[in-house]
Amino acid sequence: MFDPAQAHDTGVAITTSAPGMITLRGALEDTAFKAAVEEVSGLTVPEPREIVQSGEHRLAWMGPDEALLILPRDALCDTLAALETALKGHHALVADMSDARRLFHLTGPDAALRDTLARLCPVDMRAFQLGEIRRTRLAQIAAAFWMGEEGRLNLICFRSVAQYAEDLLSDAAGKGVVLH
Amino acid sequence: MLILTCPCCGVSGEETEFHGGGEAHLTREGPGADDAALEGYLFHRENPRGVHFERWRHVYGCGKWFHAARDTATLEVFGVYPAQTTSPPEDLLAVIREKRPGWTWRGLS
């Protein structure tokens, strides 16, 4: 049986976590919308394809009108309510997506992590920067990933396909794997 | 391989990260249009060998639609431009004239 906590022979270990995730839709370049989000989250609204972090809170740019706030579960309800209040009157949407998505953490040597993703995604992993978030295709499913620091890669996908993603990642994390 | 750069998020990705949305700049004919106009809207396409203008969606990325001009034979992409327009920008047309002298596509050349 596959044990996600066990390191592969390439030194890559895969774990999961279940933080709170809030999807924000609205005009990210709008100053009033920005100010409201920044006040509640305590984070600067990121530039395109950027993810910013402060403590346990992360804010990711997901599209010209979409951002994702990742935060501890125990702060979820209060933050949702605060965002709803702060964005009242704006053309915006605040949605709790915590249970719709799964978050994977891959830890290990930097090169092995990049190789693992390079086997599954049409992304040039040599050019992938720290602090960049990339939404892309992971084999047959949609996913997004980022590296906040060397040696740790985070990946989110829909919960309904989480088992598939876990199988893919654990296959691809092994040594000398060639996936078709 | 067809490599497109999404003008909405700036990602350069290969074809499988995107989804083609067919020919660009169609005039939507609705109720009240005559039969010939509706037939043209539904069925008549340029389908060229060479310069083509298309709609694409960055389906696995930011999810946005955009336009792309490319060569269907060589897969060379001449440029991408926003979805919110009814005709290609003039500077892109100049690039295509430079690279493919004598090209035509509907009323454009």
Image (tube, helix red, strand yellow):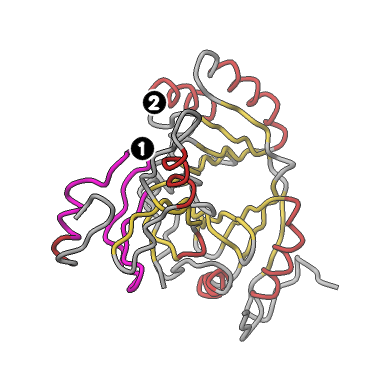
Asked if residue B87 lies in the magenta stretch, the reply is yes
The amino acid marked with disc number 1 is Gln
Tag shown at residue B84? 1
Extreme residue in the front direction: B35
Disc 2 residue type (three-letter): Asp
**Residue A126: within the magenta?**
no
Name the one closer to the observer, A61 or B64: B64
State the quadrant of the C terminus of chain B. Answer: bottom left
Q: Is residue A130 visible?
A: yes
Residue underneath mark 2: A30
Q: Residues within 10 Å of mark 1 (few under 14, many from 20)?
A: few
Q: Let me know if marks 1 and 2 both belong to one chain.
A: no
Q: Secondary structure at mark 1?
A: loop
Residue B81 position (above or below residue A122): above
- From the viewer's perspective, is A134 left or right of A105? left
Q: Let me know if residue A131 appears in the view.
A: no
Q: CA distance from mark 1 to mark 2?
A: 19 Å
